[in-house]
Each structure stands twice: as structure tokens, then as C-alpha cells.
Image (cartoon, rainbow, N blue to C red):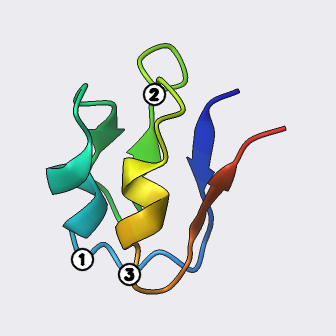
């Protein structure tokens, strides 16, 4: 199950730098490509506002 980024995202870029597969893209809030996400939790563990969670 791919991780998702909610509206609490501040677009700080911390998660993008941590993603080992390049699944995160920039925007007003960042987005995770579910086809690339490997559920490694690297992004969620570094998010300073806890805006990244497992998708449903």
C-alpha cells in the first residue's frame, strides 16, 4: 500500500530527499506516485509535520 501526503504538507522537501525510488514530486503539497512507492516509510519517518501516512 503506497504512502500518501495529506494537506498538512508544508512542501519543505525533506521527504523528497529521503525517498530512495524518487516517488515524490513537488507541488503546493508534495505527492507520492503509488506505482513507484515501495512502502519503505523513509519519507514518513522524516516528515516534520507528520503529513505522510499509509494510504488506504
Question: Which one is in front, 6 or 38?
Answer: 38
Residue drawn at (24%, 77%) of the image? 12
Indicate left or right for 46 with 32 as reference. Answer: left
How packed mark 2 is, by other alpha carbons closer than 10 Å (few <14, some 14-19, many 20 or more), is some
* Residue under label 1: 12
Indicate left or right for 37 with 25 as reference. Answer: right
The CA span between labels 3 and 2 is: 18 Å
Q: x and y percent of residue 40 in the render?
A: 46, 36
How packed mark 3 is, by other alpha carbons closer than 10 Å (few <14, some 14-19, many 20 or more), is some
* Residue under label 3: 10
Image position of 36 with respect to 41: above or below: above
Q: Are marks 2 and 1 in contact (CB under 8 Å)?
A: no
Q: Are marks 3 and 2 in contact (CB under 8 Å)?
A: no
Q: x and y percent of residue 46 in the render?
A: 35, 70
Quadrant position of residue 39: top right
Image position of 49 with respect to 1: above or below: below
Mark 2 / mark 1, whichever is N-terminal: 1
Residue drawn at (31%, 57%) of the image? 27
Residue drawn at (45%, 39%) of the image? 32
How packed mark 1 is, by other alpha carbons closer than 10 Å (few <14, some 14-19, many 20 or more), is few
Mark 3 / mark 2, whichever is N-terminal: 3
* Residue under label 2: 33
Q: x and y percent of residue 28 in the render?
A: 36, 66
Q: Quadrant of the N terminus?
A: top right
Quadrant position of residue 29: bottom left
Amino acid at each position: 500500500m503506497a504512502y500518501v501526503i495529506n494537506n498538512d504538507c508544508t512542501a519543505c522537501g525533506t521527504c523528497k530527499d529521503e525517498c530512495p525510488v524518487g516517488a515524490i514530486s513537488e507541488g503546493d503539497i508534495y505527492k507520492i506516485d503509488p506505482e513507484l512507492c515501495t512502502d519503505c516509510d523513509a519519507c514518513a519517518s522524516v516528515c516534520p509535520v507528520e503529513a505522510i501516512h499509509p494510504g488506504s
